[in-house]
Amino acid sequence: DLDLRGILSECENRGITFDELLTVPEQDEWVYSDGKSTTCVVFILEMYKAAGLFEPMSSSIQVTEFT
């Protein structure tokens, strides 16, 4: 877990600005120190995605970005 100073340092190490970091879309497969990021909406959209409702563009949809 990084504090703000650590996050800014990591941004510098990766050659991106903090503003650019904030625009990175959250990926469905990311797991945080306290588990997956989810809400009721994300849970339902994950079921829709698994059922194929978003085909043929399913692979480009990150349901965690709908919250």
Image (cartoon, rainbow, N blue to C red):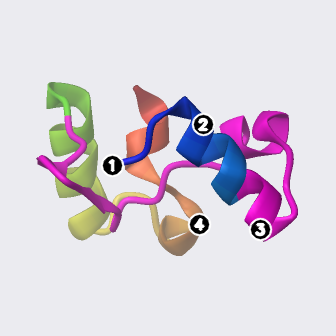
Residue 33 higher or lower than 3, as above or below: below
- The reply to whether discs 2 and 3 touch (Cβ–Cβ < 8 Å) is no
Of tags 3 and 4, the one toward the viewer is 3
Which type of secondary structure does the marked residue at label 1 adopt? loop
Along the line of sight, which residue is nearer the eye, 41 or 33? 33
* Residue 61 image position (x, y, % from top left): 52, 58
Along the line of sight, which residue is nearer the eye, 4 or 17? 4
Which type of secondary structure does the marked residue at label 3 adopt? helix
- The reply to whether discs 4 and 1 touch (Cβ–Cβ < 8 Å) is no
- Disc 3 versus disc 4: distance between alpha carbons? 24 Å
Quickly name the residue at label 3: 14
Which type of secondary structure does the marked residue at label 4 adopt? helix
Please tell me which of labels 2 and 4 falls first in the chain. Answer: 2
Q: How packed is label 4: few (under 14 Cα within 10 Å), some, or many (20 or more)?
A: few
* Numbered tag placed on residue 60 in the rendering: 4
Please tell me which of labels 3 and 4 falls first in the chain. Answer: 3
Please tell me which of labels 3 and 1 falls first in the chain. Answer: 1
Q: Is residue 51 magenta?
A: no
| Residue name at image x 35 percent, y 58 percent | 53
- Disc 2 versus disc 3: distance between alpha carbons? 14 Å
Of tags 1 and 2, the one toward the viewer is 2
* Numbered tag placed on residue 5 in the rendering: 2
For the magenta stretch, what is the residue range? Answer: 11-38
Quickly name the residue at label 1: 1
Please tell me which of labels 4 and 1 falls first in the chain. Answer: 1
Tag 2: amino acid: Arg
